[in-house]
Image (spheres, helix red, strand yellow):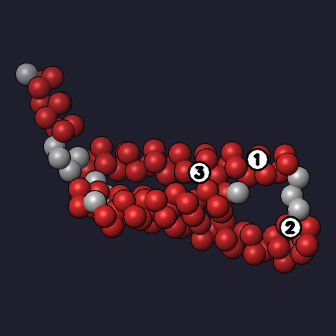
Amino acid sequence: MTLLITVIAALITTVVWYTKPHARKLRVGSLALMYWGASLMWLVDAVVEYAELRAEYFTPAAADMLNDAFLGICVSALGVVIWLVMVLLKDPDGVVRTALGKKAE
């Protein structure tokens, strides 16, 4: 489930980055790279786990699937939080700078 969730997130962010010109300015490509990196990590984890468990890998318990889904959602949310911090620090449209400038006056 973690692999599936991160691959879906990576595909969605890649499509958004590719189709929306403003998304490039907001560094959506960085978010896509984070998700693709997480997907690669979970793919390696799945291959190693399959090498250890063989056929049992394809019959996980419901609790394990729920834990994996929760982990995948948490990883995706953490990626969004890191991306938001990056966007706020970069401030491509100058929104934060303008808001802070108005408060200082």
Mark 2 Cα-neighbour bin, 10 Å: few <14, some 14–19, many ≥20: some
Which structural element holds mark 3?
Answer: helix
Q: Which quarter of the rendering shows the C terminus?
A: top left
Q: Position of residue 27 (x, y in %)?
A: 31, 58
Q: Position of residue 87 (x, y in %)?
A: 31, 48
From the viewer's side, name the closer residue of 18 and 84: 18
Give the residue type at disc 1. Answer: Asn
Mark 1 Cα-neighbour bin, 10 Å: few <14, some 14–19, many ≥20: few
Q: From mark 2 to mark 1, how far is it between C-alphas?
A: 15 Å
Which structural element holds mark 1?
Answer: helix
**Labels 2 & 1 near each other (Cβ < 8 A):** no
Residue on which the image places disc 3: 75
In the rendered image, the vertical position of residue 69 relative to residue 38, given as above or below: above
Q: Position of residue 33 (x, y in %)?
A: 45, 66
In the rendered image, the vertical position of residue 91 relative to residue 103, given as above or below: below
Residue on which the image places disc 2: 57
Numbered tag placed on residue 67 in the rendering: 1
Give the residue type at disc 3. Answer: Val
